[in-house]
Image (cartoon, helix red, strand yellow):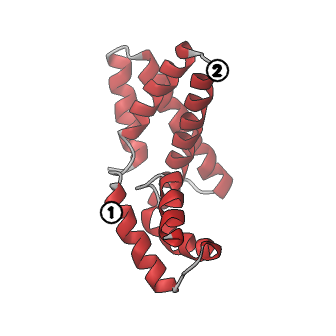
Amino acid sequence: MSLQERLTDDMKQAMRAKQKDRLTTIRMVKASLQNEAIKFGRQDLTEEEELTVLNREMKQRRDSLREFESAGREDLASKVADEIVVLEAYMPEQLSEEEVTAIVKAAIAQTNASAPSDMGKVMGVVMPQVKGKADGGLVNRIVKQQLTN
């Protein structure tokens, strides 16, 4: 079942269960996916393109959550946190920090990176492997840590 079909089924279930917040979040994601398809001039997106859209939506919400929490807006922060929970159901299983570290170490060996100035080379190898499965901030931190050791 494609992501679009899953979203449509979940949207119908949310309507039947009268889960307004969940329904709103699913509709926003569907709209983002449709806008992306229109941008590419196609009917359907590839799995990778769908994952890119989901990652973008997730990142926007995480950024909003940080902003709302720092501004003391708990009402908005809890709403965004609920949206993040809904989105996480559609994301692939996340890699653990140890798994990301292993991928980073392999990329460092592959690129013969030895200094923090080689970070771009390492990130270029790592990010396609962990796309959608690990937060970019986590990968960035681990690469910096490995290159400075």
Residue located at (35% from left, 69% from top): 102
Place of residue 30 in the rendered image (x, y in percent of width and height, measured from the top left):
51, 38
Place of residue 83 in the rendered image (x, y in percent of width and height, measured from the top left):
47, 28
Q: How many marks?
A: 2
The residue tagged 2 is: 71
Against 18, is 113 above or below? below
Crowding at dot 2, Cα within 10 Å, few <14 / some 14-19 / many 20+, comes out as few
Instruction: Check residue 99 in the rendering and tell me which mark sits there, or answer none.
Output: 1
Against 142, is 9 above or below? above
**Labels 2 and 1: the sequence-earlier one:** 2
Q: Amino acid at mark 2?
A: Ala
Q: Amino acid at mark 1?
A: Glu
Residue 45 appears in view: no
Q: Secondary structure at mark 2?
A: loop
Residue 75 appears in view: yes
Q: Quadrant of residue 33?
A: top right
Q: Secondary structure at mark 1?
A: helix
Q: Quadrant of residue 101?
A: bottom left
Residue located at (67% from left, 52% from top): 39
